Image (cartoon, rainbow, N blue to C red):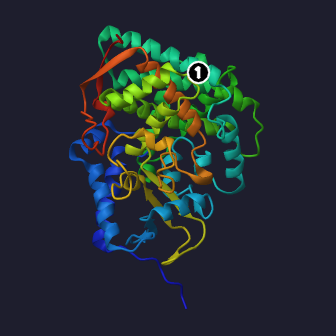
Amino acid sequence: MPAQALPTASALDTARLLLGVLLPTLAEGPVIKRPRAVGLAARLELDSKAVAIMRKVHGKYPDGPLMLKLPIRKQAVVLAPEDVETVLAQSPDPFSPASSEKKAALSHFQPSNVLISQGPVRTVRRVLHEQVLDTDHPVHRLADAFVPVVEDEIQELLVDAVRAGSLPWDDFADAWHRVMRRVVFGDHAADDTGLTMMLDRLRKDGNWAFLKPVRKRTRARLNERIRGELARAEPGSLAAVLAAAPKGDGAEPADQVPQWLFALDNTGMAAFRALAVLVTHPEAMAAARREIDGDTSGRRHLPYLRACVLEVLRLWPTTPMILRQTTQPVQWARGLMPAGCGVLVYTPYFHRDDRHLRSAHNFSPERWLTDEDDGWPLVPFSDGPVVCPGKQLVLLLTSTALASLVSGHDFEVQEGPRLDPARPLPGTMDNYSVTLGVSLRA
């Protein structure tokens, strides 16, 4: 007797999910954000509407993964929080992060990266990432080198911002890219905008995944450029740690670096969004400054500011779709999921669930400092064995940046969304439209 199949969405509900959830998310840019699309999503409240669609569809079907009614692709959407935990806890096998869609997107600029690897070579590459990024330690071994880099670039940024009287997103992004290059390669790479532009060009192609051919020559030039930077690895950089780390077969260092640059770029977006929220939330700003004033770690470990970044990533995840693909059939309580099936975890649905989550639409960094929401899938960095290996490094760099920004300067919103602490925060945060007024703190 054949095994019972998982419930399947109707053609209408499948269309709702594709057009109302998947399409807007892809339009905003899965690999690199498209500013105009983000602005349109904010104006039309598309991300909030996507969460509402997920809730409506979930209400029509039992808990458990829901298969979509598609002619070719076998695809499931996760609806229940406990199933999110199952999928993430059982990654990379049987729920591989190397889904077909992710391979097509990331192969444009990092075809041999751990994110789209499987089997023994994935294990080798994962170990290398964890060694270099200090995955298990809240404070990276090179924090004494990284913290001054962040402070230096932020102070230079603030000098110009005070002179101009404003801080737009583009200026912050330029400064953050300098931080990225110095952290990864060393001070000599601070001005290497060409490398960033080359990577961004390939990432834009990655947004189109299967629909755009790979620029193999450009990808080869990027790889060669990274090899050159690694050959000049400076003490106090990730490149230096990478050079000294033991490497197994298949863990070519230059193939792993693009992911760090990719991830750190998204990190800058989270830092700027966190600044915009702090500026509009006086109580949170006061708590952040109390932590900064009482800090004895030299900005190496600022729990409240780290919680602010995590909360911003909960509200506006830079990676709203966690993708997996089954390596074998998986038996669920309500039926069998076939091998080769795509699995989508749409994180905003869980991050913004006001039926079960306190202050789901408000800025509440304190939730990350308690165990109140333990067991609920708040997964801005994914979770389980495939959790982002750079999570702690990201929190170190972003919290240091925020401390450097707000400790001696005051800000106000000159342009952009008004983030009222007394009202639900929007489903989309258009950081590209934000300009902050800047002045020396009285």
Farthest-out residue, top: 163
Q: Residue at x 31, y 43 (%)?
A: 428
What is the quadrant of the N terminus in the image? bottom right
In the rendered image, residue 89, in percent from the top left (x then y), is placed at 59, 59
Q: Is residue 422 above or below residue 378?
A: above
Exactly how many numbered labels are in the figure?
Answer: 1
Viewer can see residue 191? no
Q: Considering the numbered disc 1 on the image, is that residue within a helix, a strand or a loop?
A: loop
Farthest-out residue, left: 44
Q: Is residue 343 above or below residue 239?
A: below
Viewer can see residue 287? yes
In this view of the protein, which residue sits in the foreground, 432 or 82? 82
In this view of the protein, which residue sits in the foreground, 307 or 250? 307
Q: Report which quarter residue 162 is drawn in.
A: top left
In the rendered image, residue 297, in percent from the top left (x then y), is placed at 60, 23
Question: In this rendering, would 24 be left or right of 147?
Answer: left
Mark 1: amino acid: Thr
Q: Which residue in the structure is indicated by mark 1?
A: 296
In the rendered image, residue 391, in percent from the top left (x then y), is placed at 56, 39
Q: Residue at x 67, y 46 (%)?
A: 126
